[in-house]
Image (spheres, rainbow, N blue to C red):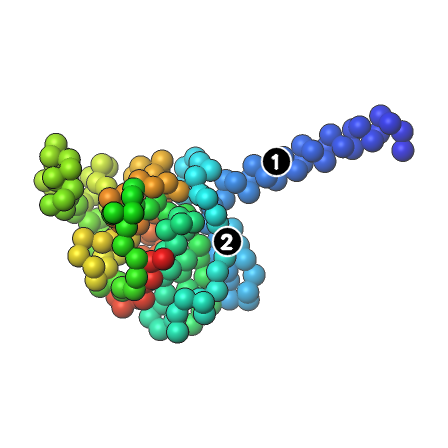
Amino acid sequence: MTAENRKSLNRRLFLGGAAALTSAAALPAFGQTLDGSTEMLPAAGSQVRNNVSSFRMLEWQDYFDNTRNGAILVDITSRALHFWSEDQSIYRLYPTSVPLSEELTRRGRTEVVQKVVNPTWRPTPSMRERNPEWPEVVEGGAPDNPLGTRALYLSWTYYRIHGTHDTRKIGRRSSNGCVGLYNEHIQELFNMAKVGTQVLLI
């Protein structure tokens, strides 16, 4: 192989590798199918920022005794939400927004107690204290609703797993305590999760 051919080959390999890396960075959600293969899920139709500090698949056995009613694991550090269906045939991994600070963060076991389409948002008393200029209510379906298009209410008062219209928040410390997903991802999770789904925040 001539020096010119080697140079051309190296350039093609570099450009191909760069394109592959760029494509991988733009696909933040992963799913595992029934046959055990892994599929990459699209980035919810919006630009993806490299905000996530760590993004890796996990095994449910390390965090739950079983997957009865399904299981959701939220990893605050890696800013990722993991979902396993009850029969373990479905696994999903989504990028999330997480609380702004440790003071706003809650960890431990809870469960989904209610599922709401186009939820109405009301700031908590402490949020109103910090931000008195905020509205008292934003109706469901409004384009500026902080809960997006779907919400999974948890047994902890005021805590939700919900969508967001502000996609810049995903992968960042940006919430007042809740866990946020792209609207497309919360809609998918909403359809798979049920009242009684186990939830663990770590």
The image position of residue 131, as x and y in percent, is 15, 35
Indicate which disc residue 41 carries.
none
Q: How crowded is mark 2: few (under 14 residues within 10 Å), some or many (20 or more)?
A: few
**Residue labelled with disc 1:** 19
Q: Is residue 40 above or below residue 109?
A: above
Question: Which label's residue is closer to the chain start, 2 or 1?
Answer: 1
Residues tagged 2 and 1 counted as in contact (Cβ below 8 A): no
- Left or right position of 160 against 124: right
Marks 2 and 1 sit apart, C-alpha to C-alpha, by 21 Å
The quadrant in which the C terminus is found is bottom left
- Left or right position of 16 against 193: right
> What residue sits 44% from the left and 54% below the top?
93
The image position of residue 130, as x and y in percent, is 15, 37
Can residue 131 be seen in this snapshot? Answer: yes
Can residue 139 be seen in this snapshot? Answer: no
Q: Residues within 10 Å of mark 1 (few under 14, many from 20)?
A: few
**Residue labelled with disc 2:** 56
Of helix, strand and loop, which one carries label 2? loop
